[in-house]
């Protein structure tokens, strides 16, 4: 047996824990000396290899428990690792005092040397809410407008700098303009001084202060370098710069560091993770041994081949290819649908069909790119009576911003709704503080009246100060105006008016936290939801009924979550909806991050596919109503990158006309390539399109942006340079014209030659 002598126990014999490991896993366990990078693909048993490696170091006497540093990203992962090691080595696992998260280990070190960075032990560790409150105090002390520059925004900016290992004196001067008109760095400095005054540290400080201690006191650094004979890091691809610097300092002397990770699953760049950390491991540690875990124990061959074919398009990666001993299994299904409503309906039908075959609901998961996509599926599951659970956050109508928006609408519908009044009267802040709200409440109780009625009475009295009285008057008048507007405005227009005039949309626009964009997306989705009802009352009744549904039975409910939340999980059946350009890959991510963001989006797609064990079903829509507006959609470029032999196309025929397979014309999956004349004149296509329209109505044109042009309406002339709209390709500009044939450069699909009767002025 290879490596048996090295693996032998001090008491003789081969340890049982090596049994059942494949060759690569065994190599990862036995390669104890020097730097080691274990590239562990999805579903390759890396947790077993990782925990067995730690147990092996202890079992063979290479290190005592207190001489091992093992770092994970979550407390849950640390607990599971400790339990697995304990199952192998028994009670000695209790001596693993340096097994934990980056933050927990950083806190242990900081408590021993707190005075070096101006703290006293014990010190307080602030959570995210405390950080935001402290940042708000710093902003107020600087005389800045907190409505414009929020505490959470400053806390987010400071946390981003700390993730990069930057103290105030190291932040580049030009980055000071990212917040508060150039005052960000001085606010960061004030924030740190305030922390010292409070004898407190935030999460970022736990490593930043460690770096300061190690950098200014080489003797202390040497103590820890000597102590940690072996280091092991899980999920190395998710480390940020500060974590990377911390690890490198500790590993410099002994170099016995083993990093386990998967560059193809690095999907947290938005919170500071640097995929470059794992890509440059061999440069950081010359002579490092690289072990690839590629044998997958989770998925079918087609699922693995589809994922591998997709991720191969990334340039910044360390090559590996997943494989399995399994045979058979269904191909990855790719389905094109007419619109988002049909997508939700068909996925619901698929789930019911699987359930009828005896599959548990908990075996199925719907993984979306962004949380706003969940509403359509929640609505559909509620209609069908399917139990579901949302992972990584509350259900759509339980989210803070959605509850706030609905509270505004409830107050418009009924000014006597005290719960709605109390929730949003001072949100965003209107100088209706706690004392004012208590006064309103007290008067309402004494009179047996609503808070709105009590507010009107207070406006006629002298019980409130001038500032509070003025703010309350403005709020009451605003609600009264919305109530009058509701008599002639449609639900969607009214909702947009209320969210804008109340300042609530601006409240989230000006919030610089990581969640702000998602909050805004969900507000736009509220507008979208309201637009599906004829009256505001009908919508609010619907919300009440949906919100009243009991929590899903944990034993049998469909999983609904974002792709980010799904990392590390697996399910027999996985649905991946919304694979369209702009949705996935996210246009916002591409605009902010360019080529690097595209590669991370592709890694996210790879993560989604590899969550599936038996069945993976991808879908995209030709049209999607987003934020109350219909948009023509193109299938994601990721669809086109899937290897053809591993994909089964299950689109409804004729839905996309030019592509019998259901893929848009730019895709290499087109089953038939025909010229534009044949395409537009094809009677079969017209009949199919009409049939599709009856099943799922064609989206209306965006009001004020274009006029619909019917087929066969005659020659419509467009000048060179004219801005036009096409039902399939979206917006573009005319670059050439010859008779009725017009060449248009479309924003998202390049140059296309089309018949002018299919164009509308934009």
Image (cartoon, grey):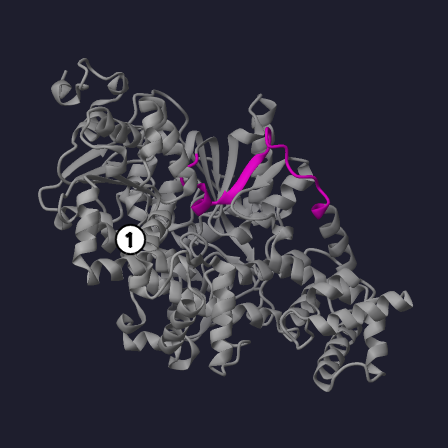
Nearer-the-camera pick, 563 or 64:
64
Identified at 30% across, 25% down, the residue is 324
Which quadrant, please, contains the N terminus? top left
- The question of residue 279 being in magenta is answered with no
Considering depth in this image, is 482 or 270 the residue closer to the camera?
Answer: 270
> Which residues lie in the magenta part?
546-569
| Left or right of 618 in this view: 559 | right
SS under mark 1:
helix
Category of crowding for the residue at label 1, using alpha-carbon neighbours closer than 10 angstroms: few (below 14), some (14–19), many (at least 20): many
Query: Quarter-wise, where is residue 567 in the image?
Result: top left
Look at the picture and state if 16 lies above or below 318: above
Tell me if 330 is positioned left or right of 364 in this view: left
Residue at the top extreme?
13
Quadrant in the rendering for residue 24 = top left
Determine if the magenta segment contains residue 565. yes
- Which residue is rendered at x = 43% and y = 75% of the image? 719
Tell me if I can see residue 488 in this picture: no
Where does residue 650 sit, x and y in percent of width and height? 47, 35
Q: Nearer the viewer, residue 390 or 732?
A: 390
Vertical order, 366 against 516 (above or below): above
Given the current orientation, which residue lies at the most extreme bottom position? 466
Could one spot residue 574 in this view of the protein? yes
> On screen, 169 above or below 346?
below
Residue hosting label 1: 243
> Picture coordinates of residue 670 (x, y %)?
38, 43
């Amino acid at each position: 047996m290879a490596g048996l002598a090295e693996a032998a126990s001090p008491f003789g014999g081969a340890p049982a824990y090596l049994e059942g490991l494949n060759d690569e896993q065994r190599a990862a366990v036995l390669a104890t000396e020097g730097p080691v990078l274990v590239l562990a693909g999805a579903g390759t048993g890396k947790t077993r290899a990782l925990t067995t490696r730690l147990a092996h170091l202890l079992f063979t006497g290479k290190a005592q428990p207190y001489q091992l540093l093992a770092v994970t990203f979550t407390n849950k992962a640390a607990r599971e690792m400790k339990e697995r090691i304990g199952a192998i080595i028994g009670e000695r696992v209790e001596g693993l005092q340096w097994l934990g998260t980056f933050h927990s280990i950083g806190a242990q070190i900081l408590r021993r040397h707190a005075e070096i960075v101006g703290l006293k032990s014990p010190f307080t560790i602030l959570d995210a809410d405390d950080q935001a409150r402290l940042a708000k105090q710093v902003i107020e002390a600087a005389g800045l407008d907190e409505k414009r520059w929020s505490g959470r925004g400053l806390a987010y900016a400071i946390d981003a700098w700390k993730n990069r290992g930057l103290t105030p004196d190291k932040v580049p001067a030009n980055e000071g303009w990212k917040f508060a008109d150039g005052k960000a760095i001085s606010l960061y400095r004030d924030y740190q001084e305030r922390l010292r005054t409070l004898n407190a540290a935030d999460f970022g400080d736990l490593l930043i202060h460690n770096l300061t201690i190690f950098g200014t006191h080489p003797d202390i650094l040497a103590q820890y370098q000597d102590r940690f004979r072996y280091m092991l890091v899980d999920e190395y691809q998710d480390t940020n710069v500060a974590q990377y610097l911390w690890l490198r300092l500790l590993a410099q002397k002994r170099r016995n560091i083993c990093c386990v990770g998967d560059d193809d699953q690095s999907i947290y760049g938005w919170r500071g993770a640097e995929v470059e950390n794992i890509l440059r491991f061999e440069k950081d540690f010359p002579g490092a041994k690289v072990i690839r875990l590629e044998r997958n124990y989770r998925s079918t061959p087609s699922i693995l081949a589809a994922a591998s074919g997709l991720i191969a398009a990334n340039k910044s990666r360390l090559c590996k290819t997943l494989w399995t001993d399994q045979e058979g299994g269904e191909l990855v299904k790719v389905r094109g649908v007419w619109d988002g409503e049909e997508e939700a309906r068909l996925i619901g039908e698929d789930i019911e069909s699987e359930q009828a075959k005896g599959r548990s609901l908990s075996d199925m998961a719907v993984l979306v790119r962004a949380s706003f996509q969940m509403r359509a599926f929640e609505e559909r599951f509620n209609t069908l009576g399917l139990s579901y659970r949302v992972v990584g956050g509350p259900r759509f109508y339980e989210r803070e911003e959605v509850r706030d928006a609905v509270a505004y609408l409830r107050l418009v519908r009924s000014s006597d709704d005290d719960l709605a009044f109390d929730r949003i009267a001072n949100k965003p802040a209107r100088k209706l503080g706690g004392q004012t709200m208590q006064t309103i409440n007290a008067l309402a109780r004494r009179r047996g009246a609503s808070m709105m009625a009590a507010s009107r009475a207070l406006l006629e009295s002298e019980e409130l100060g001038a500032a509070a009285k003025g703010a309350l008057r403005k709020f009451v008048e605003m609600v009264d105006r919305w109530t009058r507007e509701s008599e002639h405005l449609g639900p969607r227009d009214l909702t947009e008016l209320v969210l804008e005039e109340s300042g609530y949309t601006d409240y989230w626009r000006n919030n610089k936290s990581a969640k702000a964009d998602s909050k805004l997306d969900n507000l736009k989705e509220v507008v979208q939801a309201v637009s599906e009802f004829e009256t505001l009352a009908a919508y609010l009744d619907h919300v009440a009924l949906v919100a009243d549904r009991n929590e899903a039975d944990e034993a049998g409910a469909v999983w609904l979550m974002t792709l980010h939340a799904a990392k590390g999980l697996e399910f027999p059946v996985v649905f991946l909806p919304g694979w369209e350009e702009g949705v996935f890959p996210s246009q916002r991510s591409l605009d902010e991050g360019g080529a690097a963001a595209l590669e991370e989006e592709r890694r996210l797609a790879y993560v989604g596919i590899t969550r599936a064990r038996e069945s993976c079903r991808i879908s995209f829509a030709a049209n999607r109503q987003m934020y109350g507006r219909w948009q023509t959609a193109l299938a994601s470029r990721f669809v086109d990158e899937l290897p053809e032999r591993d994909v089964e196309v299950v689109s409804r025929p004729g839905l996309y006309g030019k592509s019998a397979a259901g893929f848009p014309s730019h895709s290499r999956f087109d089953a038939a390539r025909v010229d534009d004349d044949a395409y537009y004149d094809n009677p079969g296509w017209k009949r199919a399109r009409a049939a599709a329209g009856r099943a799922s109505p064609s989206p209306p044109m965006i009001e004020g942006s274009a006029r619909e042009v019917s087929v066969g309406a005659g020659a419509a002339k467009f000048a060179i340079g004219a801005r036009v709209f096409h039902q399939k390709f979206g917006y573009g500009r005319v670059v050439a014209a010859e008779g009725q044939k017009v060449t248009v450069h479309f924003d998202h699909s390049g140059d296309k030659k089309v018949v002018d009767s299919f164009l509308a002025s934009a």
